[in-house]
Amino acid sequence: MKQVQKQDIVAVALTGTLDNGTVFETIEKSEPLVIKLGEEGVPKPIQRLLIGMQPGEMRKIRLEAEEGEFGIRRSDLLQEIPKNKFSNKIEPKVGLVLSMNVESAGITHQVPATIVELKDDSIIIDYNHPLAGHPLNYEITVLEIKEQG
């Protein structure tokens, strides 16, 4: 039977969970994720796991935060903003996810930020991805080797 090799294009189903069992991602067999091995965007440990697998085979992997796509939590992505900079239409609450405008290289982007602390005159917001800093557990099944790269 065919095995996944470097540079292959494969279709996979997967379930991603946190250590506490919370499911953060599910990709079903009916709408598989298509991965081209060797390309950026797929964590290297997952690419290494896939090599040698056969269609129908399932494997599990645990990625530490620094290996995963969301990385470690960065303290430089916390920002304290005066409350008077917020619209009166928003009632700030811890856990509320806001869409914030951030300028990078002269272009303004909207990025999600989570309110993590309320102070008397300011609000602490966190631009880290909610999964940053968490180990990620994946159960991955190879459905098909689409083509050799």
Image (cartoon, grey):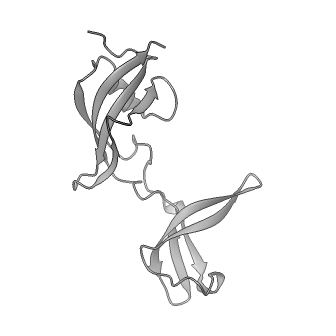
Classify the position of the N terminus by image quarter: top left
The extreme top residue here reads: 1
Q: How many marks?
A: 0
The extreme right residue here reads: 106
Left or right: 94 as drawn, with respect to 98: left
- Residue 32 position by quadrant: top left
Q: Establish if 81 lies above or below 72.
A: below
Give the percent coordinates (x, y) of residue 56.
24, 23
Q: Establish if 136 lies above or below 1.
A: below
Give the percent coordinates (x, y) of residue 48.
35, 24
- Residue 69 position by quadrant: top left
The extreme bottom residue here reads: 120
Residue at (46, 17) in percent of width and height: 7
Give the percent coordinates (x, y) of residue 125.
52, 71
Left or right: 10 as drawn, with respect to 107: left
Q: Establish if 100 lies above or below 69.
A: below
Give the percent coordinates (x, y) of residue 59.
23, 30
Residue at (31, 34) in percent of width and height: 29
Foreground residue among 107 and 63:
107
Q: Establish if 84 lies above or below 138.
A: below
Residue at (66, 62) in percent of width and height: 102
Foreground residue among 35 and 20:
35
Residue at (34, 36) in percent of width and height: 30
